[in-house]
Amino acid sequence: MTSRSELSRGSRIGLPIAGTVVGIGLWWLLTVVFDIRTLFLPSPPDVVDAFFREPSYLFTETWATLWATITGFAIAAVAGLLGGMLLTSSRIVEQATLPMIVAFNAVPKVSLVPLLIVWVDYGPRMRISLVVLIAFFPILVSTMAGLTSTPAELTELTRSLSASRLKTYLKVRLPWALPQLFVGMKVGITLALIGAVVAEIQSPNAGLGSIITASGQSADTSLAFAAITLLAVLGVGLFYLVVAAERLAVPWARQISA
């Protein structure tokens, strides 16, 4: 007899695959039944044909997008973690700087692209800079939420053991904050990919965003959909890489929440 855990494990793998297959089937059916022209909505075979038509081009630009996303996200993760630790270490520092950070985050990041082009020029540095700006804030906020959620009992225990402030951070507060930190990182990795594509569309000299822009200008909708499909695959892959890192770093979190 199959256990509930085995069923849930199979469902976690099988249901997303089944949903994807059904979605692609409905997309294909829609293009056939309504006889939609490829210019407006290419069918799945048209997209597959675009993959085989420009494989090296798509691979090269995929790597450019992936590199900017991972590099910018890594910088944002480190900056968000250090910033969260700094802000939660002093109430004065938090009250003095957090409103400015929130105000800056409220600025639409697309509006900063022309300034980034002036400051760091075209190319990877501009894309990475925009990724950092977009992914930083959710990681910062989740880090602060985690570090300030340490139970008072644990804080009192560290004081009774005469633990230093650094040891308290490293041994108690930071491990306790890791589940919240990974929540911000899962949001951040998705936003990082969006930031990279926005930068590529605004400055279309490399990446999958540049393919989408160029395909729109040449009316090659199939190639644009191929690039969008690759972006979707990248987004899912990067998200689940963070999920895997979370399960390795904090396996006890799932046991507590189960």
Image (tube, grey):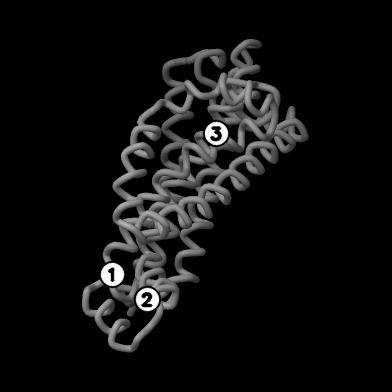
Depth order, front residue of 20/193: 193
Sequence-earlier tag: 3 or 2 = 3
Quadrant of the image for the C terminus?
bottom left
Q: Secondary structure at mark 3?
A: helix
**Image spot of residue 225 (x, y percent):** 57, 27
Sequence-earlier tag: 1 or 2 = 1
**Image spot of residue 136 (x, y percent):** 46, 44
Depth order, front residue of 188/129: 129
Sequence-earlier tag: 1 or 3 = 3
Badge count: 3
Residue named by callout 2: 172
In the displayed structure image, the side of residue 93 where residue 230 appears, left or right: right
Q: CA distance from mark 1 to mark 3?
A: 32 Å
Residue lying furthest left: 152
Q: Amino acid at mark 1?
A: Thr
Q: Secondary structure at mark 1?
A: loop
Residue shown at 54%/38% (left/top)? 131
Residue 112 visible in this rendered orientation of the protein: yes
Q: Residues within 10 Å of mark 2 (few under 14, many from 20)?
A: some
Q: CA distance from mark 1 to mark 2?
A: 8 Å
Residue lying furthest front: 92
3 vs 2, front mark: 2
1 vs 3, front mark: 1
Residue 223 visible in this rendered orientation of the protein: no
Q: CA distance from mark 3 to mark 2?
A: 33 Å
Q: Amino acid at mark 3?
A: Leu
Residue shown at 41%/26% (left/top)? 108
**Image spot of residue 165 (x, y percent):** 39, 74
Marks 1 and 3 close (CB-CB < 8 Å): no
Q: Report the disc number at residue 130.
A: 3
Residue named by callout 1: 150
Q: Amino acid at mark 2?
A: Val
